Amino acid sequence: MEEKWAKVIIHASAFFAPVLVPILFFLISSEESVKRISIQALLFQFVMWVLIGISVVLSFLLIGIPFLIIFGIMTFVVPIIGIFNALRETPWNYPIVGRWV
């Protein structure tokens, strides 16, 4: 599969299979950039789940509600930005986890 479309599928998988698709592309792809994006996408989803979970717990104290809104929006907007950058074939890293990989 072409590298561009593999990246688009990995970014879009955040909406239908956020764990399965990045793991599969990491295992079957031989291209280093696709492997890097798949690990970043997987880490980003994991970090967002943890942050949203912490925000839910803190929302009982009312201080977590703004964080819950921000992290919820980030969970949907960041993969869309990744899709657009993959279609333009522009190098792009996920926020928060981009430098970890």
Image (cartoon, rainbow, N blue to C red):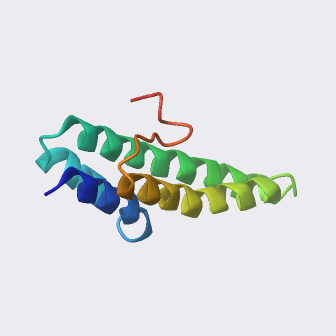
Image coordinates for residue 6, horizontal then vertical, percent: 24, 56
Residue visible at 30% across and 53% down in the picture: 7
In the picture shown, does residue 35 fall above or below 60?
above
Which part of the image, by quadrant, shows the N terminus?
bottom left
Of all residues shown, which one is farthest toward the right? 62
Considering depth in this image, is 91 or 24 the residue closer to the camera? 91
Image coordinates for residue 78, horizontal then vertical, percent: 54, 55
Image coordinates for residue 39, horizontal then vertical, percent: 34, 41
In the picture shown, does residue 65 fall above or below 41?
below
Q: 100 left or right of 34? A: right
Considering depth in this image, is 6 or 74 the residue closer to the camera? 6
Of all residues shown, which one is farthest toward the top? 100
Please tell me how many numbered marks the rendered image carries.
Answer: 0
Of all residues shown, which one is farthest toward the bottom? 16
Residue visible at 20% across and 54% down in the picture: 24
Considering depth in this image, is 74 or 45 the residue closer to the camera? 74
Q: Is residue 17 at all visible to an observer of this figure? A: yes
Residue visible at 71% across and 53% down in the picture: 55
Which part of the image, by quadrant, shows the C terminus?
top left
Q: 29 left or right of 96? A: left
Q: Is residue 19 at all visible to an observer of this figure? A: no
Residue visible at 72% across and 56% down in the picture: 70
Q: 42 left or right of 65? A: left
In the picture shown, does residue 24 fall above or below 16?
above
Considering depth in this image, is 53 or 46 the residue closer to the camera? 46
Q: 35 left or right of 54? A: left
